[in-house]
Image: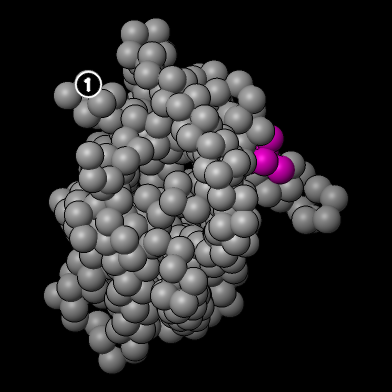
Amino acid sequence: MRRWTVLLVLSIVMMTGYIFWDILSPLSTLIKAPTAEGGLGWTAEEYGFFSGSYSFFNVFLLMLVWGGLILDRMGPRFTGILATTMMLLGATICYYAMTQLSSTESWHLPFVGLQKAQVVIAALGFGAFGVGCDMTGIAISALIVSWFTGRELASAMGIQVALARVGTALAISMSPIIAYHYGLHGPLIVGVGVLLTGFILFAVYVATMDKKSARIKGQEAKEEQKEKVAQPASNTEKKSFSVLAFALIVLLCVCFYSSIRPFLKFSTDVLINKFDVDGVTAGWISSILPYGTIVLTPLFGHLYDRYGHGATLMLAGCCLTLLSHFMLMLPIINNTWIAVIVMFCLGVAFSLVPSAMWASIPQIVPYKRLGISYSIIFYIQNWGLMLTPIWVGRSIDLHTQTQTDGTLIVDYQTPLSIFVGISFLATVVALLLLVVDKHQQIGLERPNIVAR
């Protein structure tokens, strides 16, 4: 019972990060609106730049690599406190920039040219938040592994992911309502308050609950050393195979998440323009994607724990993502109910892949290397999360036409085709991972629960 209580606390901490991450996702139309109408007057490219800034520090300053090294040396508790502090600080900077700074002042920056000061400062804050959020994810993943290794690991990972999706769903569905009543600053201040709650919860966990993970980590290190002495040849063979599987999972992670997370940043705008629904309705339809994962992710995790087939689950999720994006891209599909079905299918896919992928990593990587391994995965993933929204935002601007009455018409076929291409790459990588696991018997198709 104790480990499930710990899981709930850690999952809520992670959920607070996801709430702020997506608190502005359904407000892209409002953010692009003129200041006279309560917006910020940003272009789609500026909004894409801001969305991609989540990964700037993680990518260019190698912050996730440093975070993984800090985790392996200092432990997940210290790393978690540092990370939740970074999340709160970055969110506060973001709130200040978007509510207190003028949207008309511009700066000339090296390499990027003329940029609005408000966009730059907000992007710096969101980048700092991104460092903290991903470091929090690394620390919490390591803690969950320490509590659930040999038990219901995929189920635990599934529950943690499901609660993170609750945060995404709450942000996407409630943010337009809050903004309608209180303006753009309303969702931002709510997001900052939620992150403060997450920081306090993690501090309480460190002070009162975390006494077991260090002991488990030490036991696993001893067992690994015994296996290394007893079977040196097979251990070397396993590591060479594991490196290949790990590389494929890294590629799968960056492709799959790049086809989903950046899409959420633009999904409400797509629904408003292509399916002709209002902002609140678009937010609710978009929230179907994360809401659909709440029950399904733990369910798929349980199936993986009991029956295995992790690589198959990942391939099925990628195929479903590809089909969903392809349907959404087709110009002849503009019925609102089709959009609802597509969002639900993406939610199923967003359950299948993470429920198996995150639980597969500890089967490949020794516990003492989990910190740097997760940091590598998050680092590569951040390249996709940074570049994809910038790419899509620029594509939207290029395919936007101004009508004679001043209204803007966007052709979303090309921007949506970007997500089709990325999800196709994810499907190919998932298929390769299944083939490698089948031929080299890595164990991704085996159950997680160890017989006792």
Classify the position of the C terminus by image quarter: top left
Q: How many labels does the image show?
A: 1
Q: Which residue is drawn at 53% across and 32% down?
A: 221
Asked if the magenta segment contains residue 369, the reply would be no
Label 1 crowd (10 A; few <14 / some 14-19 / many >=20): few
Residue 444, placed above or below residue 123: below
In the rendered image, residue 396, in percent from the top left (x then y), is placed at 52, 72
Q: Can residue 407 be seen in this view?
A: yes
Q: Is residue 374 visible?
A: no
Q: Which range of residues does the magenta coloring cover?
A: 62-67
State the residue lying farthest toward the front.
Answer: 230
Classify the position of the N terminus by image quarter: top left
In the rendered image, residue 204, in percent from the top left (x then y), is placed at 36, 11
Under circle 1, the secondary element is helix
Q: Which residue is drawn at 55% across and 23% down?
A: 75
Q: Which residue is drawn at 73% across and 47% down?
A: 60
Q: Nearer the viewer, residue 399 or 207?
A: 207
Asked if the magenta segment contains residue 63, the reply would be yes
In the rendered image, residue 76, in percent from the top left (x then y), is placed at 50, 25
In the image: residue 34, left or right of residue 291: right
Main secondary structure found in the magenta portion: helix
Amino acid identity at mark 1: Arg
Q: Residue at x 38, y 62 (%)?
A: 444
Residue 254, placed above or below residue 235: below
In the rendered image, residue 260, in percent from the top left (x then y), is placed at 40, 63
Residue 202, placed above or below residue 331: above
**Disc 1 designates what residue?**
2
Q: Which of 139 and 279 is in front in this view?
A: 139
